[in-house]
Amino acid sequence: MMTIIAMLLLMATYPARCEILRSPVSKEELRVELAMITESAASECSARLRSFVEELEGLFPQLTSVAPVQSLFKKYFPLEGCDPAQVLAICKTSKYCSDLSTHPSIMVIGFDSRPDDLHRGIYVQFGVDRKSGDTQLTFVKVKI
């Protein structure tokens, strides 16, 4: 009974909303809307990732601890709805991009401040779920 009263109140207060709920929506309209949302998320992801890579490149020459990279992770991650191909293209523009590991469900990308030195520098990595485009597994360490 309370549900019926709530629906009647909703219909009286927001008639346009109730009309939308009752009107049929085609699968094609839903696909277009989903594509727009997906494209928007991928664009936002690309912009944030570019900024992350640019800031990381600026930090790498003078880094002596992981704290500045952890701050970058807090500022830019998690990223959601990324296009894995765009993520790879953006990361490859960095001279510090050192590793790429692709698995059926995830792609892991690494950056190394000193790729020629096994015992000095900072190593950063993160993963991208290849289906959802969401980032995961952010990681930073001092090489010793």
Image (spheres, grey):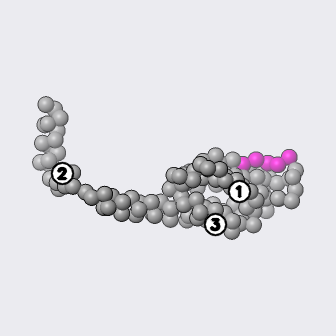
Q: Main secondary structure of the magenta part?
A: strand
Magenta stretch, residue numbers: 140-144
Secondary structure state at the residue bearing disc 1? strand
Structural distance between the alpha carbons of marks 1 and 3? 12 Å
N-term mark: 2 or 1: 2
Residue labelled with disc 2:
22
Task: Give the amino acid at mark 1.
Answer: Leu
Q: For this view, does 133 lie left or right of residue 98?
A: left
Above or below, 55 against 3 in this view is: below
In the rendered image, the residue lying farthest to the bottom is 93
Task: Give the amino acid at mark 3.
Answer: Ala
N-term mark: 1 or 3: 3
Front one among 132 and 8: 132
> Is the Cβ of the residue at disc 2 closer than 8 Å to that at disc 3?
no
Residue labelled with disc 1:
100
Residue labelled with disc 3:
89
Q: Residues within 10 Å of mark 1 (few under 14, many from 20)?
A: some
Image point (74%, 57%), residue name:
99
Secondary structure state at the residue bearing disc 3? helix
> Is the Cβ of the residue at disc 1 closer than 8 Å to that at disc 3?
no
Image point (64%, 46%), residue name:
137
Q: For this view, does 60 lie left or right of residue 83?
A: right
Image point (77%, 57%), residue name:
112
Structural distance between the alpha carbons of marks 2 and 3? 44 Å
Task: Give the amino acid at mark 2.
Answer: Arg
Residue 45: x percent and y percent? 54, 60
